[in-house]
Amino acid sequence: MSQTVPQQIQKQYADLKRDLERYSRAYYSDDSPLISDSEFDKLFDSLLELEKKFPALVTADSPSQRVGAPPSKKFVKVQHRERMLSLQKVNTAEEFAEFDRRVREGLFGKDDSAGKEIEYFIEPKLDGLAVELVYENGILTVGSTRGDGSIGEDITVNLRTVKSIPLRLSEKTAQRWPRLEVRGEVYMPLADFKAMNKRLSSNGLPNMANPRNGAAGSLRQLDSRITASRPLAFFAYSAHSADESFGTTLVTHRQTLSFLLEEGFPVNTQSTLCRGVEVVASKFAKLTKGRSTMAYEIDGMVIKVNSLSEQATLGSIARAPRWAVAWKFAAEEAETIVEDVIFSVGRTGVVTPVAAFKPVQVSGVTVSNASLHNEDEINTLDLRIGDHVIIRRAGDVIPDVREVVFDKRDGSEKKVSFPKKCPSCAEKLLRAEGEAAYRCANRACPAQLIGRVYHFGSKGGFEIDGFGEKIATQLVERKLLKTPADLFFLSKETILTLDLMANKRATNLLQALERAKGTALHRVIYALGIPGVGETAAVALAEYFGSIDKIITAQLDELVTIDGIGPLIAQALVEFFADAENQAMLERLKEAGLTFPHEQQQTVTDGALSGQIFVITGTLSQPRGVYKKLIESHGGKVAATISAKTNYLLAGEKAGSKLKKAEKLDVTVIDEERLAEMVK
Ligand code: IVH
């Protein structure tokens, strides 16, 4: 450390660092916080302040490293000291018994193996991404992906942002084993995954396919500040060291896990020791049952021989150890070959790569293609045309490419090149900074128009019976409409010129279009296909404004105050309605005779709170939803943020900035009792 840092500061810094580590571990690994979030933030801020004043203090294990760093150009390769193995797989109790027999024979010889029971350690098989963490003199210095088992990618800065990964080990361990490797799985808890997709959706961004891709994609960010913003968690499942004393100190897998737990690593609590085949099988049945209630995705159970010396005796074959096996849940997965990757353009211009593969049965359904989502996803999977891939369909979920079977590559596979131009209209594709998607910005792009027209008539929108993608495609390709609104002006003669369109169908379609003219306001708003405006936002807008003209003329500062409308959606709305072409389309809808009726859902117009806008803040005696319902059922409205239009702020305990703002804007502040009186 530089001499310019006074001793006393050095000590203060070391103490701060130690405290923060302790609190962080209690919070993220032990799930039992020792101090409040704001106290933690305060300490953290003082650490950052010290580091700013004395940059020489900053070390690799500083908690400040958890916030991420500016982007790097690419990942460098790291060689694993010990190969990172994969696992043999079994699918049935018979296959597991077979594995057990091989283990017994391997340890005791064919003749003496009968009647022996092996002590196994079982763990849930997490569906995330395997990583290796190297601790040198107790400090996390290198973190990497598994890669091909021998060489992975250096994602150290990203792994430092995963809060439950210790940045430093105990003094004792640091001295005993100057180089220690810890391996485990980085994953995204299900609830966080869902919340994250909700957030992406409300910002008009594409969703992540599944938690595993969420974890893998987040870890592969070149900008670790993005990784830091992602809800990643970690479970450690093994430790390795070349040091001789390591092998004599820890002699079972279970001991290794206890050691890891002591060092602050999260270790899966659903793990346990068990003896013999039957017990393992019953544990597997139990895990299968409990699977759907777990907080994270698992795809099976890992069964490991507990004794490390027995593991050593058994050794490994090719890429997998003889002492461990993955017992996978009944197949929702199937293997097939990628024949092509095609690029489809959606209604917002986003270009989505789609893998077309040899048709294959997955949980009873034949599938022949799956979205690859975006370019990053293709890179994360490292998918090439001709690759063998594992397709997965969880329940009734859309099929998804889980992984490439690298072992089956023969060199003939072709890399996927993302098009530079729109496959539909040849416009140059653009990728906005910080976004994974490429977009075609040409509003007249036929593929986009097909998407918009189809969305317009779909469920949630005008819901036009007998109107689907095929008709939308024909109408656009034959230049029979320029905007979705033109649908309402189609004549029977025109409709009859479409393929497979008989008189009866044409009549039905026309009747459906006629009916659609009375579609409710919120559905019309949804049908317009404004970026980020899904059904929830559409309902919120209809409820708040009550008429199409008020929505069209709404200003940004008012839009952002509406519950359920974020700044990005608000911006998209303003842009949409400012656009001349869209204005013309709305005029045309009116011309067609649309009435945009607002179905007064639960809104009461003559209630005690009619016309009053409320904002809710602080801790109240019941959940906020209760008060929201109460206010709305008496005709009031609830907004998310305070503006000059707000009439009342319903404030509970610990009301913060909103209370201050209310006071500044002279908004009446009320409590629960006052609200109860108002509606009495
Ligand atoms: S042990 C030789 N334990 O499964 C030991 N792996 O197919 C190999 N995995 O790459 C790893 N949960 O990503 C082990 N409790 C667990 C695991 C686990 C998930 C993954 C890991 C590994 C893959 C092997």
Image (cartoon, helix red, strand yellow):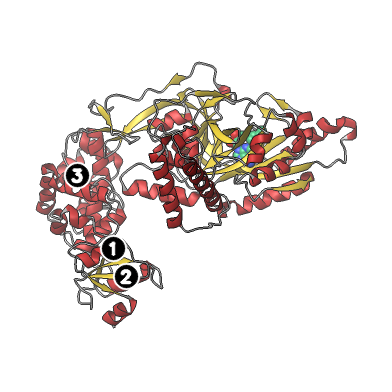
Question: In terms of image quadrants, where is residue 299?
Answer: top right
Spot occupied by residue 517 in the image (x, y as percentages of width and height): 18, 56
User: In the image shown, does 448 or 669 lie closer to the viewer?
Assistant: 669
Q: Where does label 2 land, which residue?
A: 651
Q: Residues within 10 Å of mark 1 (few under 14, many from 20)?
A: some
Numbered disc 3: secondary structure: helix
Label 1 with label 2: CB-CB less than 8 Å: yes
Question: In terms of image quadrants, where is residue 124?
Answer: top right
Q: Give the residue displayed 24% in from the left and 42% down from the top.
A: 452
- First in sequence, mark 3 or 2: give its number: 3
Q: Give the residue displayed 19% in from the left and 65% down from the top.
A: 665
- First in sequence, mark 1 or 2: give its number: 2
Q: Where does label 1 land, which residue?
A: 658
Relative to 35, is 514 on the left or the right?
left
> Between marks 3 and 1, how big is the CA–CA gap?
42 Å
Which residue type does callout 1 highlight? Lys
> Between marks 1 and 2, how big is the CA–CA gap?
9 Å
> Between marks 3 and 2, how big is the CA–CA gap?
45 Å
Q: Residues within 10 Å of mark 2 (few under 14, many from 20)?
A: many
Spot occupied by residue 639 in the image (x, y as percentages of width and height): 26, 63
